[in-house]
Image (cartoon, rainbow, N blue to C red):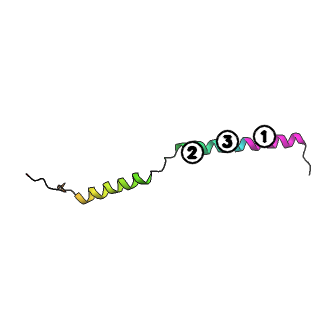
């Protein structure tokens, strides 16, 4: 089935508009999403949590003061 060149152009333009709208939507969604944390930040926060847990509620000094 041969399509009229005008009809082909209209269909192509419509499809390009759909693709542009989809790309804009994905870009907006990506911009709104939080960026993943770097590994060093995740590890650092985990170490802080472990240290806080190790100290406990008593807040005792890890290295007692001398003098």
Which residue is tagged 1?
13
- Specify the quadrant of the image occupied by residue 48: bottom left
Q: Are marks 2 and 3 in contact (CB under 8 Å)?
A: no
Q: Say which element carries label 2.
A: helix
Tell me, for residue 21, which label it has, or none.
Answer: 3
Whole-number angstrom distance, CA of label 1 to CA of label 3: 12 Å
Mark 2, Cα crowd under 10 Å, few <14 / some 14-19 / many 20+, is few
Q: Secondary structure at mark 3?
A: helix
Q: Residue at x 17, y 55 (%)?
A: 61
Q: Earlier in the sequence, mark 2 or mark 3?
A: 3
Q: Are marks 1 and 3 in contact (CB under 8 Å)?
A: no
What secondary structure do most residues of the magenta stretch adopt? helix
Residue 29 tag number = 2
| Residue 41 position in % (x across, y down) | 40, 51
Residue 24, image quadrant: top right
**If you read the primary sequence from the N terminus, does the residue marked by circle 1 or circle 3 appear first?**
1
Instruction: Examine the structure image and report whether residue 11 is included in the region drawn in magenta.
Output: yes
Q: Label 3 crowding class (10 Å Cα cut-off): few <14, some 14-19, many 20+?
A: few
Q: Quadrant of residue 20?
A: top right
Distance from disc 2 to disc 3, alpha carbons, whole Å, reads 12 Å
Mark 2 to mark 1 CA distance (whole Å): 24 Å
Q: Residue at x 78, y 40 (%)?
A: 13
Span of residues in magenta: 1-16
Whichever of callouts 2 and 1 sits on the residue coming sooner in the sequence is 1
18 is higher (above) or lower (below) than 42: above
Q: What percent of the width, then of the height, locates residue 52? A: 27, 55
Which SS class for mark 1? helix
Instruction: Choose between 50 and 7: the one closer to the eye.
Output: 50
The answer to whether residue 3 is magenta is: yes
Q: Residues within 10 Å of mark 1 (few under 14, many from 20)?
A: few
- Residue 11: x and y in percent read 81, 43
């Amino acid at each position: 089935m041969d399509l009229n060149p005008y009809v082909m152009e209209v269909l192509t333009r419509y499809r390009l508009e759909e693709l542009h709208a989809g790309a804009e939507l994905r870009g907006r969604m990506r911009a709104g999403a939080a960026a993943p944390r770097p590994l060093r930040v995740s590890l650092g926060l985990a170490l802080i949590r472990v240290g806080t847990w190790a100290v406990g509620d008593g807040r005792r000094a890890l290295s007692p003061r001398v003098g």
